[in-house]
Image (tube, coloured by chain):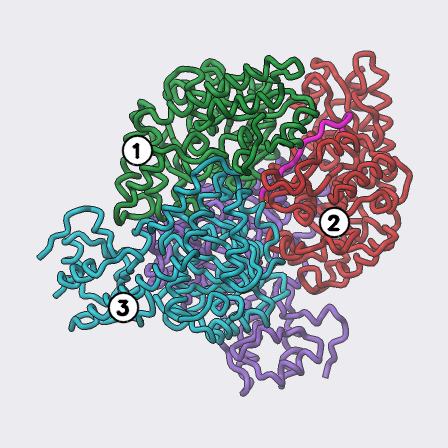
Chain colours: A purple, B red, C cyan, D green
Amino acid sequence: MEKIKTKRERVKFASDNVAGACPEVLDAILKANDGDRAPYGDDEISKNLQDKFSEIFEKKVIIFPTSSGTAANALALSTMTPSFGNIYCHKLSHINVDECGAPEFYTGGAKLVNLNGVNGKITAEELNKSISGKGVVHHTQPSSVSITQLCETGEAYELDEIKKISEIAHNHKLNMHMDGARFANALVSLDCSPAEMTWKSGIDVLSFGATKNGCLAAEAIIFFKPELVGNLPFLMKRAGHLLSKMSFVSAQLDAYITNEVWLRNAKHANAMGKKLSQGLNQHKNIELAYPTDANEIFVKIPKDIIDQLNSEGYTINDDEWDGKAVRLVTAWNTNLSDIETFLNFIK
Amino acid sequence: MEKIKTKRERVKFASDNVAGACPEVLDAILKANDGDRAPYGDDEISKNLQDKFSEIFEKKVIIFPTSSGTAANALALSTMTPSFGNIYCHKLSHINVDECGAPEFYTGGAKLVNLNGVNGKITAEELNKSISGKGVVHHTQPSSVSITQLCETGEAYELDEIKKISEIAHNHKLNMHMDGARFANALVSLDCSPAEMTWKSGIDVLSFGATKNGCLAAEAIIFFKPELVGNLPFLMKRAGHLLSKMSFVSAQLDAYITNEVWLRNAKHANAMGKKLSQGLNQHKNIELAYPTDANEIFVKIPKDIIDQLNSEGYTINDDEWDGKAVRLVTAWNTNLSDIETFLNFIK
Amino acid sequence: MEKIKTKRERVKFASDNVAGACPEVLDAILKANDGDRAPYGDDEISKNLQDKFSEIFEKKVIIFPTSSGTAANALALSTMTPSFGNIYCHKLSHINVDECGAPEFYTGGAKLVNLNGVNGKITAEELNKSISGKGVVHHTQPSSVSITQLCETGEAYELDEIKKISEIAHNHKLNMHMDGARFANALVSLDCSPAEMTWKSGIDVLSFGATKNGCLAAEAIIFFKPELVGNLPFLMKRAGHLLSKMSFVSAQLDAYITNEVWLRNAKHANAMGKKLSQGLNQHKNIELAYPTDANEIFVKIPKDIIDQLNSEGYTINDDEWDGKAVRLVTAWNTNLSDIETFLNFIK
Amino acid sequence: MEKIKTKRERVKFASDNVAGACPEVLDAILKANDGDRAPYGDDEISKNLQDKFSEIFEKKVIIFPTSSGTAANALALSTMTPSFGNIYCHKLSHINVDECGAPEFYTGGAKLVNLNGVNGKITAEELNKSISGKGVVHHTQPSSVSITQLCETGEAYELDEIKKISEIAHNHKLNMHMDGARFANALVSLDCSPAEMTWKSGIDVLSFGATKNGCLAAEAIIFFKPELVGNLPFLMKRAGHLLSKMSFVSAQLDAYITNEVWLRNAKHANAMGKKLSQGLNQHKNIELAYPTDANEIFVKIPKDIIDQLNSEGYTINDDEWDGKAVRLVTAWNTNLSDIETFLNFIK
């Protein structure tokens, strides 16, 4: 049996953020390095992104490149939520449990109202029942809703699920945010257009993830309603997220959405996810905890198998093991042999 | 006379942040992209930085890579200054006028107490007179001092100037921060060691700039006193500045301080700065506003010459023209021909 | 049948904050007005409070008078919880639902982790299971626990319940806060000493309520551990809660705890509460939702009876009517005739 | 010579906040205590204030009673200034040096831009030159101007001074705030109407001081432009400044502006101020530092006389003695004999 040797391989499947950048993105960085460029996003690459993203989304959008997803989420939410506002989100959502309170920091103290949802998705019904207290001075005020696509259990919200949630949000005059950390993986899974998965389904502001799917450090906040931009440029600068050599972030995004690089990367990651999911599902002691819609696999694996895998060099998180599930993630650079090696260990 | 043709050249001398990355830094990024790596700084490149920087600074330091100088400054200051604290700084300092209130945001509302200084430097005497109100509940509390190296007029604080300021700060139990956006340029100018320019002169925390001098987007917060680190890891994550693929920021820093790349880059930029400064000084209608210690030149140029230069494609900021001076900056990639071309236009 | 005539009586039973100040408290204000006094709590009345409260609590305490309970809670919590901290509390707690996000504002964005509890009380078991993520940079950090005495359903935490919760909190190195908005009512109900209900049961910081039980506007933050005071004086001033004529707040507190005024007031209110509770419980269509431990009565009243009561001038909140319960509150100034009048309406 | 005997008298002239409440205000509190009242400002006394203040200001105003001047200032400024905004004010202004950073706290980190002014007043000219950077993302954004009436050297801004400053502010689209801690003293000094001193001269929002001039703890935020109210009710609640028994604050304000109580109190304080000022001015070694427009006297007193006065029981602040001036303040309750006693000591 093959032995894991290098430290590098140990993090395989730990997340899609362990993968580096795809060749097209690296090339774009090298090309952008051919001379001086105006700083702070005043360069041509950055400026052209507005049109390129507008074309992709079939609508005039306003985009702000950032270098981290947490920044994109928290900045986006801060344009939609006052300091005394409520952000409705799934209790397991990244913004609620994995950003060390970034939305609270950027909004100046907003409250993340936790919804139980079904699996990792919130439902329109629960959302509707949870919104209350509007206009009453004693209560924090309903302000925005955030959903994660892929959701926290690796499933993709269907278009009509997004639409129903957005409808409830808009009925109550709340704004809709989508944390699209795995936007491309969800898009490919649903086989729909970027427009359909966002503004046509009621999304107002999107955190467009690219880092996990082939960039080095590139995300974007995308506004489908220009009136929501508000003071974002100042808030972004003030947070230290307006990079001086912004052209290199923009160059990544440019390459990412050109020639379907992003879709190709996501298709591959999803295909690998399906392979891994199917392979695991055939094991008699292993059970899928949630459907594998894309590149995240949630499985119930007996403790002894986890221990064995980790002894082979993997880093399957014991802490996340709560008797429910562990998460494995495939990426744009996952090879079939990576999967075969892994599956061989648990046979 | 040669004509400026491309948009790219127009930003020459506007700042050293218009230059891209130097070859060694780009190579390091490519090399770091050779497989999966643990995220959030748990990779080997990031971990090894601790020792490498400790060696450079001849002391066990604790460093946190970041991707923007504003983030480095504001995060550093937030470990040294409570929400009700005073940060003493030059009235023209970057933290005071060019970061859209980042220190205020990160500290939760601290006050930047402006010192007039002499040229762009604060003085120990004025600092000493300005510190007051300690322990009185009505007053914001003296907490930290920040100096910029190179200072806001392009001059380098001499070692004994730093020492005197630090002594006053420490006498009052304030912490000393250095905004080292152009750390290498100052170091080369003073011809001293990194240790001498920092902790040996009383600096407690350093924003170590690398972006302007050859990186893409890489800075570091360096603590010379471990007890000052406080809650920085949480504050950094919460601000969206803990990048998932942090290894690529670390790789830049690694390459930057290896084989004296940073010193070589800075020496070149400074030499070019001297050339440009001397060339300008020979013009009968142009006068240096401040001494050129390194790669920033502050000159009084008549309005008609500025207009002419800008008509040739430069972007010399009219707004900064206040009858006092405009700033020109050379970089690691400035060529002699860039300078000659520029000087030719004003002959 | 007697008819409600004046607007004033309409708010009877709406809360105990509709009652004015008791005579002893008013007298103390008049007495304190006999000449000039040092401002900002430097007066003798304020200074003497430290000893008087220390005597009452059988321990050297440090107290800070404030003029609102929300301020007392939020300021207290801000000394125990960093901006990236978790405050564990009941989902119905006042700090979570009735202070418009004050704890978030004062802490700079902490997260209130909602516990379901049993009725209005949190349990040690659920608390223990909820505390996680300590030291992991991605997660907001467990920092403090807050319980409300009387709790949100009008019941008093028993001493051993408080002890168990405190033990869990302290095991995890969290600090224990008690929101004692109805501290005296709970104390009288449990028939124990102030010391027993607080520090002897593990409470570290107390919001000592006095306004509802006979003051005009007087509460106090009481520290049982001096090391937790931290920067409170600065935070309080900075929030506009250090009143210049603080002696008048202190005078209220002084009178309140002198000659058992506070206990007498609470005993009366509780006795009236019991009367009202018993009277309502005899009605065949009315059912107590929770036990009446003190002066808050939670009852299920049919909608038509509520409508009738409101048509008679009461202000029983329809919004709070969720098929579960409405709240009625007696106060230090409730008369038997007030109760008889009310009960007569629903016969 | 009469000897100072009681601690109480020692604080005479230290400030006007050492005086208690005037009889009319105390009476109003007693009257308001005649039964139950709706909480949180829903009572009749509070509601009626809107009309009463509108009448006094000859314009429909929106008022929010508060219990501290610092709260009034900071809350007012937070409606006019974003977190990345500039507040232009005198370097000696109370909001800048005596509120421990309250404006920074309430705005979420705004910058107080210090103007040197002439004596304690800012000038339109300096203000105009200081406003810059609008729309540039690197700079905090000009947002509001705050002047103090009486100003920090005890002088009253003349109407045309206010008008000129307001004109500059409004030309730049900034909002005008007046910190009227000694509003009545200034009004009486200028002998003009409340409308003239505020909105007719361009003031948009006023902190209406009443505590120093005869209330216990009562101030008001007064909006002359309803569109500026914004989210104030939520921000106020969130800060713990929406008192449950708000009627007692409102009752103070009601009594204060009824039957010219406030004007009578201020006239008396100002008259006493003039007496004290004249008496001091006759001493050969004592010199007025600034004109005495109202009830604040700034005088240069030799150190030995100060020491002697303090040995007699006064509390003239040595810390404020910087070779320039000490401040003495008369109040609504200052007696002629108080002045004579004081003057006798320095003969």
Q: Where is residue A159 in the image (x, y as percent from the top left)?
A: 39, 59
Residue at x 57% of width, y 35% of height: D98
Q: Where is residue B158 in the image (x, y as percent from the top left)?
A: 86, 34
Front-lying residue, A149 or B185: B185
Front-lying residue, C1 or C288: C1
Q: Is B242 located above or below residue B185 in the figure?
A: below
Q: Is residue B272 left or right of residue A27?
A: right
Amino acid at circle 3: Lys
Per the rendered image, the range of residues in magenta is B109-121
Q: How many residues crowd around disc 1 within 10 Å: few (fewer than 14), some, or many (20 or more)?
A: some
Kindly indicate whether the residues beneath marks 1 and 2 are on one polypeptide chain.
Answer: no
Amino acid at circle 1: Gln
SS at mark 1?
Answer: helix
Residue C202: within the magenta? no
Which residue bears the numbered disc 3?
C274
Give the Cα distance between marks 3 and 2. Answer: 65 Å
Q: Where is residue D145 in the image (x, y as percent from the top left)?
A: 51, 27
The reply to whether discs 1 and 2 touch (Cβ–Cβ < 8 Å) is no
Residue C2: quarter of image: bottom left
Give the Cα distance between marks 1 and 2. Answer: 55 Å
Give the Cα distance between marks 1 and 3. Answer: 40 Å
Marker disc for residue B220: 2
Q: Is D118 located above or below residue B125 in the figure?
A: above
Image quarter where the C terminus of chain C lies is bottom left
Which residue bears the numbered disc 1?
D50
Q: Is residue C35 left or right of residue A67?
A: left
